[in-house]
Amino acid sequence: MLYYKTSQPVPGKGEAWVFYECNDSFEIVRHMTYTPATGELECVARPLVRKMTDMWAMQASSPEEFEELWQDPPEGAEAGLDPGIEYEEGREYFRLDMPIAEAMAVHPRVREVFAAFRLGGCGSCGIGEVETVGQVCAAYGVDADLLLEVLDDLIRPKDETREEAATAADDNDG
């Protein structure tokens, strides 16, 4: 495995570090974000974004540094569905007129999807919680239909073929 890290300023919290564990093809296996000033730690065992980007911004890390911080997410956290919401098959949960704060409340991995599309997340380009998904897409030149599809895929039941492919990929990793 290969280990990398990069830092990023977070308004009001100081510097945060993002750590990546990658295979030899630079596919992300696990990643985490650690904010030393607040002690916040977010560990993602099965990241939505699987390919390393911006390698120029990365610093080398080590397995020891990664494992020292890593904490396995709680059982069932991967599904990440909010128990207060009744999810219905075929329903669209995200809309272009939906405020960012509302979208973030639907599923805990929405923030990860926004980051993958490079929407907000850094000190100089944060997105406002009252802005709508459509406004943010227009401002950043993001394909709104693609973003909505990826967001809805967080909730839609996975068909058997996709689950089998994911299981096969996991089996190859181990």
Image (tube, rainbow, N blue to C red):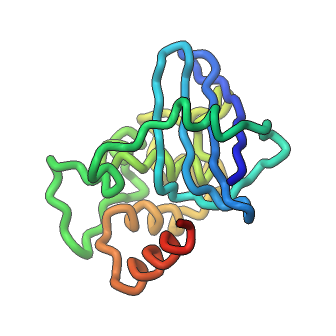
Q: Is residue 89 above or below residue 108?
A: below
The residue closer to the viewer here, 141 or 52, is 52
Residue at the farthest bottom position: 161
Residue visible at 70% across and 38% down in the picture: 62
- Which residue: 47% across, 47% down? 44
Q: In this view, does 38 lie above or below 156?
A: above
77 vs 122, nearest the viewer: 77
Quarter of the view holding residue 8: top right
The x, y position of residue 116, in whole percent, is: 59, 52
**Going 23% across and 49% down the picture, which residue do you hit?**
82
Find residue 99 and report its horizontal and vertical position in percent: 39, 43
Residue 168, image x and y in percent? 48, 79
The residue that appears at 49% across and 73% down in the rendered structure is 171
Q: Quadrant of residue 61?
A: top right
Residue 101 horizontal/vertical position (percent): 37, 38
Query: Between 26 and 67, which is closer to the camera in this rendering?
Result: 67
Looking at the picture, tell me which residue is in the foreground, 91 or 12.
Answer: 12
Quadrant (top left, top right, bottom left, bottom right) of the N terminus: bottom right
Taking the image as shown, residue 126 lies to the left or right of residue 152, namely right
Determine the residue located farthest toward the right in the rendered image: 56
How many numbered discs sit on the rendered protein?
Answer: 0
